[in-house]
Image: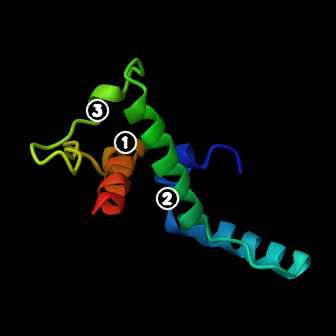
Amino acid sequence: MGNITTWFGNSTMQDRRALQRVVRSAECIIRTKVPDLHSIYSKRCWTKARKIVKDLSHPNNGLFSLLWSGKCFRSLKANTERLRRSFFPQAIQTLNQNST
C-alpha cells in the first residue's frame, strides 16, 4: 500500500472505490476479513500525528498547537480543498476526534 497517509486523503472517490474492489477481491481469495482503507488511514494518521506531537524537534511540531483548554488541537486554516484534504488538517481532526 505504500504510505497511505500520503495519498489517501486526496484520492478521489473513483480511486477509493477501485481500491475497495481490490480489497474485497483479496478478502475472497484469502477468505478472511480485511479492514477497510478508511480505518487503516485513520489509524495510521493518528499514529503518525502522535509521533509528531511527542517529538519536539520535528519540523512540523508547531502545526499541532493545543487550544486553551489543553484538550483539542487548533485547526489549520485551509483556503483550498486540496490543503483541507491533506495530511495535517486530517491528522488534527483525527486527534481531536479521539481526544473527546
Residue 19 at x, y percent in the picture: 67, 66
Q: Among all residues in the image, which is located at the extreme left?
A: 68
Q: Which mark is residue 63?
A: 3
Residue shown at 43% from the left, 26% from the top: 55
Residue shown at 73% from the left, 72% from the top: 34
Q: In the rendered view, does 71 fall on the left or right side of 91?
A: left
User: Spatial distance from mark 3 to mark 1, Cα to Cα?
Assistant: 8 Å
Of the 4 image quadrants, the one containing the C terminus is bottom left
Q: In the rendered view, does 37 fall on the left or right side of 76?
A: right
User: Spatial distance from mark 3 to mark 2, Cα to Cα?
Assistant: 18 Å
Residue shown at 38% from the left, 34% from the top: 53
Binning the other alpha carbons within 10 Å of mark 2 as few (below 14), some (14 to 19) or many (20 upward) gives many
* Disc 3 residue type (three-letter): Leu
* Disc 1 residue type (three-letter): Phe
**Coloration mode:** rainbow
Under circle 1, the secondary element is helix
- Tell me if residue 38 comes above or below residue 63 in the rendering: below
Residue shown at 54% from the left, 66% from the top: 38
The residue where tag 1 is placed is 88
| Tag 3–tag 1 contact (CB < 8 Å) | yes
